[in-house]
């Protein structure tokens, strides 16, 4: 399987005045197309910095990052913004929906920046909402949706531009346990259909829904483990009768 993410010797040093703070120390890892990877580690381990690096929100101090065949390590800000919009879908803990817009319009937003015509935007947005089980709620605004439904809209929005990889930063952090399981089940379904996913989590039980866990400590990758299939398979949308609450 072709690698979507190739990180080689990635280091990141933040400078606070004369003080250098190393956040990542020589990370080398690949994520193949169709993998579901969780990134774990204690506070200060570098997991958020690594996610920002994979998401082209930050540049490495040294090392090389190849994303879907493109070397993004030294791209300009404008080029990185274009790559983020084309290649990466983001799902955050806080949903980040525009409250006055309908679910449909929220999902259309990335496609406006990508320059897609209105008819194509609407078709794709509706398809993405149906994919996460919210086609019937497309005209509801964020305040009219539950937390789990808002996160489903956020996932649909992340899928709108058909990215090479979906990045999820603590995606169940603001949800109750049932809604959280339903969101994880959606990720598993998307992954089963071929979507590449990288998810940051501090919770081992959540991380075990992925197929592979990268464990960080002090900016280093200390363990790269495969999750046994029975753990990945639990709580899928075969339980998926219910909608998010």
Image (cartoon, rainbow, N blue to C red):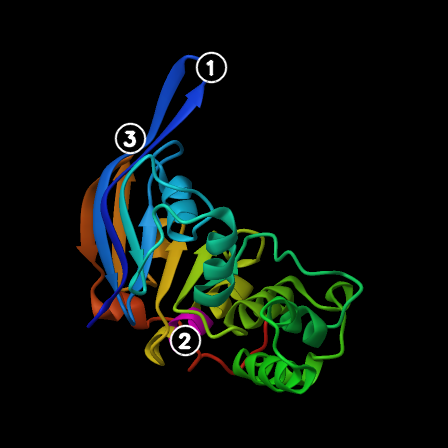
Q: Main secondary structure of the magenta part?
A: helix
Inspect the magenta stretch and tell me whether residue 225 lies in it.
Answer: no
User: Which is nearer the eye, 137 or 21?
Assistant: 21
Residue indicated by mark 3: 218
Within 10 Å of disc 1 (Cα), the crowding (few <14, some 14-19, many 20+) is few
Q: Are marks 1 and 2 in contact (CB under 8 Å)?
A: no
Q: CA distance from mark 1 to mark 3?
A: 21 Å
Q: Determine the secondary structure under disc 2.
A: helix
Front-lying residue, 33 or 231: 33
Q: Which mark is residue 190?
A: 2
User: Which callout, 1 or 3, points at the residue further toward the start of the chain?
Assistant: 1
Residue 245 visible to an observer of this rendering? no
* Residue 109 location (% of width, % of height): 65, 68
Q: Quadrant of the N terminus?
A: bottom left
Residue toward you, 206 or 94: 94
Q: Residue at x 37, y 59 (%)?
A: 198
Q: Is residue 116 visible?
A: yes
On-image quarter of the C terminus: bottom right
Please give the range of residues in magenta.
185-190
Whole-Å distance between the Cαs marked 1 and 2?
44 Å
Q: Residue furthest right?
A: 100
* Cα–Cα gap, marks 3 and 2: 32 Å
Tell me what residue is drawn at x 57 percent, y 58 percent.
Answer: 176
């Amino acid at each position: 399987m072709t690698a979507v993410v190739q990180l080689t010797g990635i280091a990141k040093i933040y400078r606070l005045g004369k003080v250098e703070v190393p956040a990542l120390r020589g990370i080398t890892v690949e994520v193949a197309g169709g993998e579901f990877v969780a990134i774990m580690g204690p506070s200060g381990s570098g997991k958020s910095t690594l996610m920002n690096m994979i998401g082209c929100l930050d540049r490495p101090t040294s090392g090389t990052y190849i994303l879907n065949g493109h070397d993004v390590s030294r791209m300009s800000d404008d080029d990185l913004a274009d790559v983020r919009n084309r290649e990466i879908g983001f799902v955050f803990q806080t949903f980040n929906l525009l409250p006055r817009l309908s679910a449909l319009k929220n999902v259309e937003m990335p496609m406006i920046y990508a320059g897609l015509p209105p008819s194509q935007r609407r078709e794709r947005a509706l398809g993405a909402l149906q994919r996460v089980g919210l086609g019937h709620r497309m005209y509801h605004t964020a305040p009219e949706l539950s937390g789990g439904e808002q996160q489903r809209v956020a996932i649909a929005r992340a899928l709108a531009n058909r990215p090479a990889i979906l990045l999820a930063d603590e995606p169940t952090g603001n949800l109750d346990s049932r809604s959280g399981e339903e969101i994880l089940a959606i990720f598993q379904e998307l992954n089963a259909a071929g979507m590449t996913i990288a998810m940051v989590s501090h919770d081992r039980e959540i991380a075990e829904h992925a197929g592979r866990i990268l464990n960080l400590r002090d900016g280093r990758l200390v363990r790269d483990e495969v999750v046994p299939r029975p753990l990945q398979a639990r709580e899928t949308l075969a339980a998926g009768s219910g909608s998010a609450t």
